[in-house]
Image (cartoon, rainbow, N blue to C red):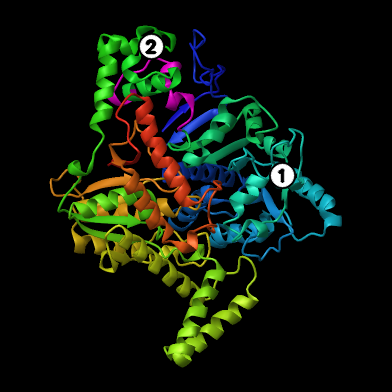
């Protein structure tokens, strides 16, 4: 991990033309930043700090007061704290907690309540006294909200203030539910939620229309009074707002930027969330760098895009005006740099003739549509190259099926029973049970086992139909239905030995030469990341010596949210207009995700529209850099 102290310089990199960097340039970060190697490393670092505070205060006979947050990012911290409690006898008897926020109105026992979240993910697994747990009361009547908020503030003061505050950050830059417009003097209060915040929460509530419009939250002033603050962020989708919060001006439009004024606030990031920080994205702007081939490629492509010139047209003046003279010196001349990078990028382009042929291939798809969304073009080429392909669908994806789709398929079954005599009593009993459940179901309720199974079958049938479009069939599909996913809820269990064993068994059976894995971190609920963890563990057990000649190659693709930058990709695989059209047709087969998917993320476009734009944009980037012009392109990283 690396860290930097509070900096002072601004980054003018967003402006066109020659850059004006102060003589004594430093990273333009205005709060301390720690970049962890992985999500797990980040969680372990923060949990270790909390454990240290617990133990130090316990030795002194004092309590420690934590401010806690909910969401997918701090869950890793809570799991590590639970491990420390179970395996290293870390006691929480001297811990007092105050949670940041709660939806309003919200019953404490609701599946959506932060009360329930905290008990499920931490409190029920450690020895913290119930009287020392404080969470805003989302069930309080409106006429008592103001008094309840004042009482919450009083309870924090009575506890001696918060010693260590955990924060997440929303896409609007909110901390807690302090949305854009929140003032630095704000205290615990009832707020209206921003539309983007409600959209981000829609998956948890199975529809944006079910997300509460208001919430109780600690205010910015309350948060800033904590003695120590840790703000956590993971995934590419947080990179943009992290840069604004850490490097931008302090503004009410990004509540997290107020943390720049705190003397002991630390921003903990994984590498994906840190990607847009100046010292990561363009380190040559702020300090002397060692020019590796990878960094040189990033710099030259950045310069090409910034100046609007093709790589082979970049001049000495372009390099000098953008603080890249040392790169020219490293290679001897602008032409040498340009030619080197141009050729390196060109060598990454792989058409069908340069792709694997007659090999054993396993494609892992976290959900039943990630395969065709992310690598439909590659799958088609692998089929044409006569590879032996298994597409392994790791989870059922059943929570992403609308109830109306279930009713539609029940109607088909009922008509078969009535018109063709197929199923008879069994169909009528199943249909009656399923329809009775759906009729009584409330938004966000966990589906009954019958409904979960019907939704699983719907997605499996769609997956087979999709790969048939590309030339595969049911015999090429393996449905693993990993246990960690089978909660019936958006939030999943941790990856266990049972999950790893299932993946390991498949790999041991197939003995693949190539393994394709979802390598993105922007899946909103972490399923892609968890699936990759299971695959990594299985691969490590089967092939402990990754340098051995007979170990499979690991190819990483990205999902519906991001694509690999051309400077990071190992291989860039072109697609013709016809191939992209076929890929989109395969995506169409996932009818339950068509038109209006249950978990679309912040992008309003359908998955096929995102894919078309993303694949065309990747090809267009190469065109602007001056390389060959292709219609569309997929990108892969080989580990």
Tag 2, which secondary structure?
helix
Instruction: Work out which residue is located at the far left of the displayed protein and give it.
Output: 549
Vertical side of 593 occupied by 29: above or below? above
Numbered circle sitting on residue 585: none
Q: Tags 2 and 1 in contact by the CB under 8 Å rule? A: no
Residue behind mark 1:
218
Q: Is residue 212 left or right of residue 285?
A: right
The x, y position of residue 382, in whole percent, is 23, 51
Numbered circle sitting on residue 319: 2
Disc 2 packing (10 Å; few <14; some 14–19; many ≥20): many
Residue nearest the observer in this picture, 224 or 196: 196
Tag 1, which secondary structure?
loop
Q: Residue at x 41, y 50 (%)?
A: 529
Q: Residue at x 28, y 65 (%)?
A: 473
Instruction: Work out which residue is located at the far front of the displayed protein and give it.
Output: 578
The x, y position of residue 585, in whole percent, is 39, 56
Mark 1 or mark 2, which is nearer the start of the sequence?
A: 1
Disc 1 packing (10 Å; few <14; some 14–19; many ≥20): many
Vertical side of 219 occupied by 22: above or below? above
Q: Is residue 469 left or right of residue 243?
A: left
Residue nearest the observer in this picture, 201 or 633: 633
Mark 2–mark 1 Cα distance, whole angstroms, equals 48 Å
The x, y position of residue 205, in whole percent, is 61, 60
Q: Quadrant of residue 267?
A: top right
126 magenta-colored: no
293 magenta-colored: yes
Q: Which residues are magenta?
A: 275-295
Q: Nearer the viewer, mark 2 or mark 1?
A: 2
Residue 152 in view in this figure: yes
Instruction: Work out which residue is located at the far right of the displayed protein and give it.
Output: 143
The x, y position of residue 608, in whole percent, is 45, 50
Q: Residue at x 42, y 42 (%)?
A: 41
């Amino acid at each position: 991990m690396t860290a930097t102290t509070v900096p002072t310089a601004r980054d003018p990199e967003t402006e066109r033309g020659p850059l004006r960097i102060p003589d004594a340039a430093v990273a333009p970060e205005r709060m301390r930043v720690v970049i962890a190697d992985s999500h797990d490393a980040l969680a372990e670092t923060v949990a270790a700090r909390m454990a240290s505070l617990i133990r130090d205060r316990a030795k002194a006979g004092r309590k420690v007061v934590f401010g806690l947050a909910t969401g997918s990012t701090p869950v890793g911290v809570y799991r590590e704290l639970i491990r420390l409690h179970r395996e290293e006898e870390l006691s929480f008897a001297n811990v007092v907690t105050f949670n940041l926020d709660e939806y309003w109105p919200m019953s404490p026992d609701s599946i959506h309540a932060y009360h329930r979240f905290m008990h499920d993910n931490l409190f029920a697994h450690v020895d913290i006294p119930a009287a020392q747990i404080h969470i805003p009361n989302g069930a309080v009547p409106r006429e008592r909200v103001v008094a309840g908020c004042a009482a919450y503030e009083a309870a924090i003061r009575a506890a001696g203030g918060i010693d260590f505050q955990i924060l997440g950050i929303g896409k609007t830059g909110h901390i807690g539910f302090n949305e854009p417009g929140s003032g630095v003097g704000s205290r615990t209060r009832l707020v209206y939620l921003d539309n983007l915040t409600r959209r981000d929460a829609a998956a948890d509530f199975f529809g944006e229309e079910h997300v509460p419009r208001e919430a109780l939250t600690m205010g910015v002033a309350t948060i800033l009074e904590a003695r120590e603050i840790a703000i956590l962020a993971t995934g590419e989708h947080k990179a943009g707002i992290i840069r604004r919060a850490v490097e931008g001006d302090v503004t009410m439009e990004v509540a997290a930027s107020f943390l720049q004024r705190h003397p002991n606030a630390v921003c903990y990031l994984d590498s994906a969330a840190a990607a847009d920080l100046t010292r990561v994205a363009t380190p040559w702007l702020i300090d002397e760098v060692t020019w590796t081939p990878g960094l040189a490629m990033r710099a030259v492509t950045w310069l090409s895009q910034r100046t609007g010139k093709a790589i082979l047209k970049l001049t000495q003046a372009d390099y000098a005006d953008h603080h890249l003279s040392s790169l020219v010196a490293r290679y001897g001349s602008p032409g040498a740099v340009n030619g080197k990078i141009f050729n390196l990028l060109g060598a990454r382009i792989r058409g069908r003739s340069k792709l694997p042929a007659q090999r054993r291939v396993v494609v892992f798809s976290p959900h039943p549509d990630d395969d065709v969304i992310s690598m439909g073009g590659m799958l088609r080429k692998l089929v044409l190259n006569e590879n032996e392909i298994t597409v392994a669908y790791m989870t059922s994806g059943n929570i992403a099926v609308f109830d109306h789709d279930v009713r539609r398929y029940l109607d088909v079954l009922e008509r078969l029973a009535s018109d063709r005599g197929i199923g008879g009593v069994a169909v009528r009993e199943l249909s009656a049970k399923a329809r009775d459940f759906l009729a009584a179901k409330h938004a966000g309720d966990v589906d009954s086992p019958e409904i979960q199974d019907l939704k699983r079958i719907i997605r499996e049938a769609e997956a087979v139909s999709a790969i048939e479009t590309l030339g595969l069939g049911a015999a090429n599909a393996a449905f693993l239905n990993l246990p960690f996913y089978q909660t019936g809820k958006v939030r999943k269990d941790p990856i266990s030995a049972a999950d790893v064993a299932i993946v390991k068994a498949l790999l041991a059976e197939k003995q693949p030469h190539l393994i394709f894995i979802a390598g993105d971190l922007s899946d909103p609920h972490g399923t892609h990341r968890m699936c990759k963890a299971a695959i990594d563990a299985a691969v490590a057990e089967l092939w402990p010596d990754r340098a051995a000649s007979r170990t499979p190659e690991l190819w990483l693709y990205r999902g519906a949210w991001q694509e690999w930058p051309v400077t990071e990709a190992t291989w860039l695989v072109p697609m013709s207009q016809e191939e992209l059209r076929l890929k989109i047709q395969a995506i169409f087969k996932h009818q339950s995700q068509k038109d209006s998917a249950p978990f679309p993320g912040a992008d309003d476009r359908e998955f096929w529209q995102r894919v078309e734009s993303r694949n065309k944009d990747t090809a267009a980037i190469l065109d602007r850099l001056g390389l060959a012009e292709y219609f569309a392109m997929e990108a892969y990283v080989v580990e």
